[in-house]
Image (spheres, rainbow, N blue to C red):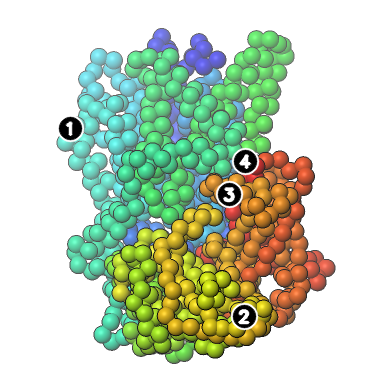
Amino acid sequence: MIGMERSTPAQPANDGATATVIAKVSQRLLAPADALLATAAGLLAGLVYWLGSAPGVLFGDGGELQFAAWLAGLPHPTGYPLYMLLGWAWTHGLAGLDLATPARAMNLLSVVFAALTVSLTYLLAHALVELSVTGAPRHARRLASFLAALAFAFTPTFWSQAVVTEVYALNAAFVALILGLAIRWQKGLDRERSQADPGAEPAAYRTWPSRALLLLAFVVGLSLAHHRTTLLLVPVLVIFVWRQDGYRLRRPRWLVPLALAMLVPLLLYVYVPLRVNQSPYLLVNLDPEHVVDLVNRSPRGLVGYILGRNFAGELQGPSSAMASAPSLLDRFVAELTPVGLGLALLGVGYLAVSAIAAGGTSHNVYRRLLWLTGGSFLVLTAFNLFYAIEDIAVFYIPSYLIMTCWIAIAAAFTAREVADLVHRLRPQPPGLSRMAGSAILLLLAALPLQLFLGHAGQVDRSGHTRPQAWWDRLLEADPAQDAVLVSNDRDEIMPLWYLQQVDGRRPDLTGLFPGLIPGDDWEDVGQVLDNALASNRPTYLVKPMPGLEVKVALGLNDSAGLTPVLGPAATRSPDRPQDILIGDEMRLVGYDVNPVQVQPGQTLTVDLYWQPTRDIPIDLTSFVHLRTEDGTKLSQSDTLVGGVYYPTSLWKPGEVLLDRHQLTVPPDAPPGPYELFAGMYELVGQEARTIGSRLLSGRVGGEAQPQTPQTAPARPTYANFNDEILLIGYDVAGGRLVALDGRPQTASQDVPPDEVRIQLLWQAAQPMSRDYTVFVHLVDPAAGIVAQLDAQPFDGDYPTSVWQQGELLTDTLVVQLPRELQPGEYTIMVGLYDAGTASQSRLPAYDDGGQRLSNDRVSLVQISLE
């Protein structure tokens, strides 16, 4: 049991014996067996990382770090000077030996750092176990530490950073090294005290900081030259040292050397001003009079860059942080499994109870270790609750590392208790208790194995060639000389910069994206397009972005997705000027209609010219109704105006946007004239809150033609199926439906209780030669697929092989629910596959960031059925 009587460092009566044990342990830097096991853990994890590492250039920060390291340039703040210098030496070394491209070399550098982290995690875990679970057999302590290190190695977030170019593997290595060096210093201090004259003052056995403490300070400074979150550990370390040696820590002979040891590595930040002018990609030349400098090169600006001041806005208040706290349980379970989380809690609980049982003894090792690991865990985790950056998940990696060390403590403690229990029950044969303890530890091997098997497919990047292939296609499409290429996502442009800076391909092109520099002129893709068009250079979108037609006139996108931007969408005054205020936020300044003399059965195109009067915080849907003179509605068109790429929440006061609607006059409609109504509403769940509507001046007329309704789904989404088909919207209705993504809904009276109707808005990204089949899965998190539908779009009446490039199509699918389906929450999954092939393989599916979706299907929405 915890706190049971045995020779441990916590027992006051055995302080001298404990000090002797610590002294003996501290005399060797690293036992050969521990060095071997640490190396084995690192090599095993490293082999897995190497096999799953990305082969080349990456989207996002990874792509940026790849070309910045090759050029010894500056990436995004805070510059990561240590990482950049190591990356420069590594990439040029491998490239010089013709072993890897710069992109591949940087991916492999993460493999090396991650494998090193796993080795250091073993050493840290073993040091903790060695001091806290002294009664456990040596082989049990080592096996527990080894398996815990492997469990950390295969936590999905850390694993995902080990196979791509990122800074977090090296940061985790520093965290493990810093905590390990702190324990190493503690052991040395205890050894000094055990050897000193009991009556001597503390200064009598050391007047200067030990080499271990100086090394710890130096490594902290070196870590700060890589990632600023190391600052969070500094207060924990200061208190850790102060509580054990505060008598000397406050003396100048200690403070000055320690301060210098920590500050000297920070001189690496001189790299920033030295290399800022050697990073050509930081100057974006739009035209001779408009050069965008991505870095403020003034002394104050460079200090702000080093401190990462542009991230200060991501810090949220205490109320928001507390609201995020309940999600920690789900986050930890997802990383460590429920069993792993339980073991981690047992390990830290063991330290806490043992610290209390040891009381105020002078050698309460448990209290020291609890503060070092628990304090570090708390400050790191608490900071993450306040930091609302998009990729916050990776900032939890050090927390997971500490938790796996607690798992090692729990495993060793359990093995010790089981061995003691067996020994009390069956003293003979002597080796039986040891075998029982070892058997318990073997069960721990299931944890890293489960993590490995559960996440191997998810984190594997060995086939991640999409960034290179995508940009190869775009460049092979041969955009015009000196063209500007625009994306709504910075991540998508980074591979272009790599190909330009490293491979020298198409240096004449300029890639632009929102957030290029801080400020109001680059906040969204609409402003990026304004800047691009102002340069009078040929401008393209790098992918189809439905909805941007309200902002700019677009040509036809080619097979690669490259779409010419012809100019502003609204280049002239509307044919029918209006001055209609819709609510207090939008003005309708006019409209065009074609044909004016529309006949029944014909399609009518209505272009609305909107002008926002103020900033709009919500995304509005516009509509046009076609009615007879007596008020009977004949047809209507509703669209989330601007789509997902330029919705009304991004519109700027005063700009004029062109909103196109198409309506079909029913074939049995009476002859004209007809009236047009236009307006806007906010969609709140299934409820439409009307902002306003008005009758437009002027009439249209016609005669009967076949009906082709053009009502589009109101819920935006995005999925890219093999660059051939885009899914950009959907609606869901059902007789048993009571909530969508947790928001209450009114069950549809028009849909039977045994049906769920799903309306999908597709866009053909390029011509297709195959007829693809749509599948819809209704998934129970526990039971898997509980209902599904496979069908060609429009029941085969309009197969994908005849879809026109750029065409928008709305299809309704009905999924039959099993009679026995219980009330609960289910997820609707959608994908496409080729039923004409023997394998019936699914089309590769990617999200808006270019990441491949699991099982090549998109998760539309979570529904609740009554």
Which element carries disc 4, helix, strand or loop? helix
The mark that comes first in sequence, 1 or 4, is 1
Residue 273 badge: none
Give the CA separation, mark 1 to mark 2. Answer: 97 Å
Few, some or many C-alpha atoms within 10 Å of disc 2 (few <14, some 14-19, many ≥20)?
some
Q: Is residue 73 left or right of residue 138?
A: left
Give the CA separation, mark 3 to mark 1. Answer: 71 Å
Cβ–Cβ below 8 Å for labels 1 and 4?
Answer: no
> In the rendered image, which residue does mark 1 sit on?
251
Please identify, in this view, whether the residue under mark 3 or under mark 1 is nearer the observer: 3
Q: Looking at the picture, which amino acid does disc 3 mark?
A: Thr
Which element carries disc 3, helix, strand or loop? loop
Q: Position of residue 720 (x, y in %)?
A: 60, 68
Residue 371 quadrant: top left
Cβ–Cβ below 8 Å for labels 4 and 2?
Answer: no
Please identify, in this view, whether the residue under mark 1 or under mark 2 is nearer the observer: 2
The mark that comes first in sequence, 3 or 2, is 2
Q: Residue at x 56, y 71 (%)?
A: 632
